[in-house]
Amino acid sequence: GIGMVFARKLAPHHDLLLIARRKDLLDALASELTARHGSVVTILPADLTDETQLSVVADRIANESTLGLLVNNAGFGFRGAFWEADLSVIERMHRLHVMAVVRLTHAALGVLVKQNRGAIINVASVAAFAQRAGSASYGATKSWLATLTEGIYLDLKRANSAVIVQALCPGFTYSGFHDVIGENRESLAPPSLWLTAEDVVDASLSALARGSLFVVPGWRYKLLTAILGKLPTWLKLRVEASRTNRAG
């Protein structure tokens, strides 16, 4: 998915610390990148929804004196009415999308601001700009993530810091995300609205060099979010309700 592509794009010129739950996948990716590029790739298996494991990761980041970039990419989705969803799943999503980002971003900024260099990429979503029936928690956490990133951006500007923060807001992207939650891609959107993970990462890294705060890959999604940003709330809700009724 997006995280793997970030690793592959960055490995030719950077050493990496890869963090995810599955050690087997981390081992395989680390071996691939080391063999191909000769970069130093360290892995740290961790479930970021677990407080103890999250603390280990945050401490590791806080003590990385050569830290140059943090990519907060971990996330998952589910579909269903909020009150019908398993509460434990909702809470896990908020721990991962919200509290893990808080802890890791705070740890990274402690290093980057002192060095007055580096960047953080927070992977949000176009869902940050418009809610969708069946995704109340997901849309809320992504909206929060975009707002947090904007607030940190303003803090950094006030401090005259050279550190860059970015809210990456992709639309539908080919990855394992929708497979995990069992959604049929064809029923979600036409092929023209689907992005590749390479499209998303290329847009992100290109915009990082310009210091862009919000990055929306793909011209169709740029147009969509621009329009949504100008619509009054009542009209956005009416459009969403109409789309939901047609999908149902």
Image (cartoon, rainbow, N blue to C red):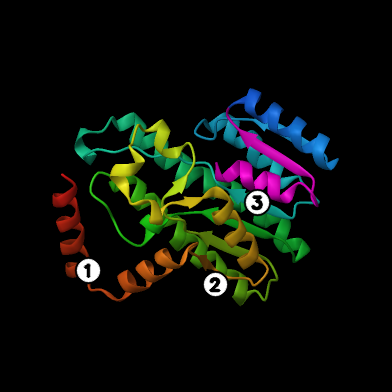
Q: Secondary structure at mark 2?
A: helix
- Residue 154 vertical position relative to residue 131 in the rendered view, above or below: below
Q: Amino acid at mark 1?
A: Thr
Circle 3/circle 1 CB separation < 8 Å: no
Quote the CA–CA distance across marks 2 and 1: 25 Å
- Asked whether, in this view, residue 125 is left or right of residue 228, the answer is right
Along the line of sight, the residue nearer the viewer: 196 or 229:
196
Q: Which mark lies nearer to you, 2 or 3?
A: 3
Q: Which span of residues is magenta-colored?
A: 1-21
Residue 17: give x, y in percent of width and height: 72, 40
Callout 2 crowding tier (Cα within 10 Å): few <14, some 14–19, many ≥20: few
- Asked whether, in this view, residue 80 is left or right of residue 216, the answer is left
Residue 158: give x, y in percent of width and height: 60, 76
Instruction: Examine the structure image and report whether residue 234 is included in the region drawn in magenta.
Output: no
- Residue 125 vertical position relative to residue 26 in the rendered view, above or below: below
Callout 3 crowding tier (Cα within 10 Å): few <14, some 14–19, many ≥20: some
Q: Which mark lies nearer to you, 2 or 1?
A: 1
Snapshot quadrant of residue 135:
top left
Residue assigned mark 1: 233
Question: Which residue is most to the front?
Answer: 191
Residue assigned mark 3: 70
